[in-house]
Amino acid sequence: MKIAILGGDGFCGWPTSVHLSAQGHDIHIIDNLSRRWIDTELGVQSLTPMDSIQERCRIWKQVSGETIHFHLLDLSKEFERLKQWLATHKPDAIVHFAEQRAAPYSMKSDRHKVYTVNNNVNATHNLLAAVVESGIDAHIVHLGTMGVYGYSSVGAPIPEGYLDVEIDTPSGKKEQEILYPTRPGSVYHMTKSLDQILFQFYAQNDGLRITDLHQGIVWGTHTDQTARHEQLVNRFDYDGDYGTVLNRFLIQAAIDYPLTVHGSGGQTRAFIHIRDSVRCIELALSDAPKSGDRVKIFNQMTETHRVRDLAELVAKIAGARIAYLPNPRKEAAENDLIVQNDKFLALGLEPTTLAEGLLSEVVDVARKYAHRIDRSRVPAVSAWTKDLAARVEQDP
Ligand code: NAD
Ligand code: USQ
């Protein structure tokens, strides 16, 4: 297939690009490199030394013999160029990763809220409108998030996208299928909830073929393909805005920094290793909906864990200390989370569990690159409200 990977320079996009290229697909990365600019804005860098996207593609050609094409394009601002690109290249499938994905970054200030909404909602809507206008029949696979549901599973598993509800009407009870209700906990997660409505509309109105993958927190670094050459290494964010919780704990342990648990650490979240994330995208591409189908929704996660349990596990493996800090986020102090993920298991996913992957990740990656860590960038200082900001700043 000819596959456009929107956001293919990012943490999930790059390993997906090389994985699909290795399988013989014709890969075209579209990215505006905004994530690299945000590193500059925040004064941080990936734990792993990342080459430019052009250099990564050159090394990939050398290692694999396959070509990955790169196109510099801003999805949220360059609608006409996007439309022309689609009409000219006619991809069979489009994988859409190209959004601002950090909840703390989206809550940093009013400017960051506005940027995140403008960037994410316009990127998704521009893509959908451009696919309709160019008349192509590409299967769109979008990376959504488990967080749209707000982690309140009311004791029942979160289903894969849809819920059957019974409604009282004057003529008696009627059954209706609805999108599982969203309750996002950050401006970033809110944009993913809005994306869902855009997808529902374009599938129903224009017959677009869309799969929405509600992904949990991705951990790990390498996949089989990124491990083939030092210069193909994946990015690894550890700072207080972009670093996700388990990857942060791993590098904190490597530099003897007390593990930064927010509040009591009673938050339960869904997780998936980057290797499984890449494989799920391959599986979703092979199982495309037909035109006229409702949006196909998968829960893309393999395990759930409580944050303090993760901290205790990393502390045990790596001998780290744990610090329980005031939580800069407005979120439930404790929650349960049960998630259905039967669809990917049925398609053949064999999950990498924390138990297997964790030790090598600590040793191979976190310790190898520990000298690149700026300790001053580790604290998470982006607060959800002004009240919480005052508490975080007072934290010694
Ligand atoms: P990332 O920030 O590393 O990558 C996103 C890429 O998209 C970057 O290369 C960025 O430059 C590009 N981009 C952003 N806006 C763009 C625009 N307007 N035009 C063109 N390119 C643009 O993020 P990631 O961790 O790779 O996440 C990818 C997707 O997966 C996101 O949509 C995210 O919401 C979703 N997701 C990520 C995780 C995770 O733990 N990393 C978990 C669940 C879902
Ligand atoms: N947390 C800590 N200590 C830290 C960092 C985080 O205790 O140092 C806690 C947070 O308070 C939160 C939980 O860990 O309760 C998860 O935080 P996170 O930053 O790892 O994940 P999150 O903000 O939810 O966002 C990440 C990705 C996002 C993706 C989402 C999947 O950045 O793109 O959509 O995971 S999910 O959480 O399932 O919505």
Image: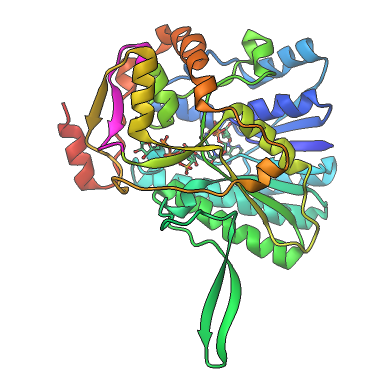
Q: Nearer the viewer, residue 77 or 165?
A: 165
**Which residue occupies the foreground of this view, 388 or 70?**
388
Q: Position of residue 267 (x, y in %)?
A: 35, 41
Quadrant in the rendering for residue 77: top right
Q: Is residue 51 visible?
A: yes
Residue at the image point whose x is 72% and y is 67% from the top? 205
Region rendered in magenta: 253-265
Reply above or below: 347 against 258.
below
Residue visible at 80% across and 57% down? 290
Applied colour scheme: rainbow
Quarter that holds the C terminus: top left
In the rendered structure, the answer to whether residue 307 lies left or right of residue 264 reads right
Note whether residue 238 is visible: no
Q: If the image is split into quadrants, where does the N terminus sit?
A: top right
Q: Position of residue 10 (x, y in %)?
A: 58, 29
Q: Residue furthest bottom?
A: 170
Residue 281 at what x, y percent from top left? 69, 38
Image quarter for ligand 2 equals top left
Q: Position of residue 88 (x, y in %)?
A: 84, 42
- Residue 51 position by quadrant: top right
Q: Is residue 256 magenta?
A: yes
Left or right: 307 as drawn, with respect to 82: left
Left or right relative to 135: residue 258:
left
* Number of numbered discs: 0
Q: Nearer the viewer, residue 339 or 201?
A: 339
Residue 371 sits inside the magenta stretch: no
